[in-house]
Amino acid sequence: MTDQVKLRNEIVAIHKKRFATKKFDAAKRISAEDWLTIMEAARLSPSSFGYEPWKFLLIESQQVKDDLQDIAWGARNSLNGASHFLIGLARKHVTGDSAHVKHMVEDVFGVPYSETSPQTIFFNNFQKEDFHLTDERSLFDWAAKQTYIPLANMMTTAAYLGIDSVPIEGFNQAAVEDYLTDQGIIDPAEFGVAYMAGFGYREQAVPEKKRQKLSEIYDVIK
């Protein structure tokens, strides 16, 4: 068996092993080194135009976890057992003239920002003409979609490290955002909640993974 074949088999095996864990072993903790590797996978994730419209909150406060129980029904298993509980935020109002885009261009990309630069004009045209991102809701939804890319990378990286995970959308978005705002954790003018996620070590058997056949979801257009 060649190294390439071994690698392919390993990749498929990892994806078969990964599943949305419903019950975590609360006694087991992710090491600091493993967690930083997972977060580095998030940091290095791609985003549209490279603008990274996201932020991640690691919730360690037991009080916050307790308070979230009633407004995040789908997160209770993770709140009560996962080693690490994460909230993914999507940035609001990411437009060509926003402070965030200026920050990315100047402080991250290391080039001068200008409202009349080809990059800014191209981005504005993309938003308005190609994707019709012209109001607060559509801009947030576009940013939220970006945040799922690092989520997938975090979960796959965790699986490679022998760590289980679960993506969570089972929560009242408005109630959670109001709570985080009241606690001074987020500024609702800047961020909204995209998802939650639990990471840790499962306390259950891995069920058989059931998916559609590749032929049902994949076509080759010639």
Image (spheres, helix red, strand yellow):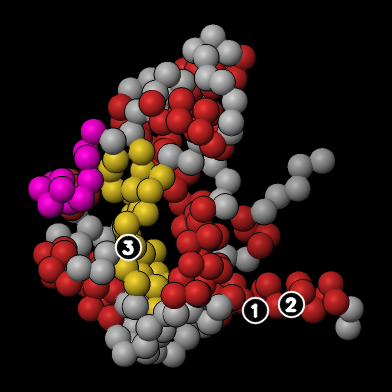
Secondary element type, mark 2? helix
Return the mark for residue 13.
1
Whole-percent x, y for residue 112 in the image: 56, 21
- How crowded pointer 2 is (Cα within 10 Å; few <14, some 14-19, many 20+) is rated as few
Given residues 111 and 187, the one toward you in this image is 111
Helix, strand, or loop for circle 1?
helix
Q: Could you tell whether 216 is left or right of 171 in the image?
A: right
Q: Mark 2 points at which residue?
A: 9
Find residue 189 and report its horizontal and vertical position in percent: 23, 33
Question: Which residue does the numbered mark 3 point to in the structure image?
Answer: 58
> Percent position (x, y) of residue 106?
52, 28
- 187 drawn magenta: yes
Q: What stretch is highlighted in magenta?
A: 178-189
| 53 lies above or below 10 | above
The percent position of residue 205, horizontal first and vertical second, equals 44, 90
Residue at 67% in and 73% down:
12
Q: Which residue is drawn at 31% across and 90% down?
A: 27
Residue 167: quadrant of the picture: bottom left
Judge depth for marks 3 and 1 and give the one in front: 3
Instruction: Please indicate, yes or no, whether residue 129 appears anywhere in the rendered image.
Output: no
The N terminus: image quadrant: bottom right
